[in-house]
Amino acid sequence: EARQMSGSLTPGGAAPRAKLSANAITDLSAYMEDFCSNAKNVPAEITRGFMLIAQLDAKVSELKNKVDEDSMAYSSAKNRNSTDMAELKRQIDEDQKQCLHYSEEKVSSAQCCLDMIQQRLNQLDDDIAGIDEFMLMQPIQGENEEGEE
């Protein structure tokens, strides 16, 4: 389900909504329903991001242990010029590059989570400003009643 707000559709929070203005608010309860529906997705999206970070962290830890073991074997080898030791050195270098790649993915995933949270906070700030503007334009209850007496 999608509701029209300020000229843009907001299907389940999939696309960023346009800035909410007082003129765009025609049904505050409908807006609040949309907001609550979209806000429910945020924890799941953050959880997925953190789960990915944890999986990558486990891979880094596993590779780091392998690099440590292989480095010990390489440093204790008597003939480092052998074909086996050259292959072990190449594998150590490859594993270190893979660790770096996983670490960069972790940082990227964390940055995506942070960006998503910041985008939601900015949208919330804009929405609150629009609601405040809308509420200020509403007549105060009792104002009409006093004028009629």
Image (cartoon, grey):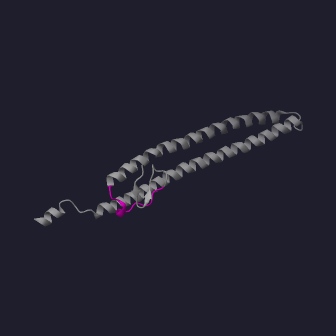
Q: Is residue 95 above or below residue 134?
A: above
Residue at (30, 60) in percent of width and height: 135
Instruction: Give the residues drawn in magenta, as a range.
Output: 16-27
> What x and y, as percent, mark residue 23?
35, 64
Residue 129 is covered by the magenta coloring: no
- Pinpoint residue 15: horizontal percent, then vertical percent: 49, 54
Residue found at the far front of this picture: 1
User: Magenta part mainly helix, strand or loop?
Assistant: loop
In the rendered image, the quadrant that contains the C terminus is: bottom left
Percent across and percent down for residue 11 are: 45, 51
Q: Is residue 80 left or right of residue 106?
A: right
Does residue 31 lie above or below 40 as drawn? below
Q: Is residue 140 above or below residue 104?
A: below
Q: Quadrant of residue 69?
A: top right
Residue 23 covered by magenta stretch: yes
* Residue furthest bottom as drawn: 147
Residue at the spot x=33%, y=58% of the render?
26
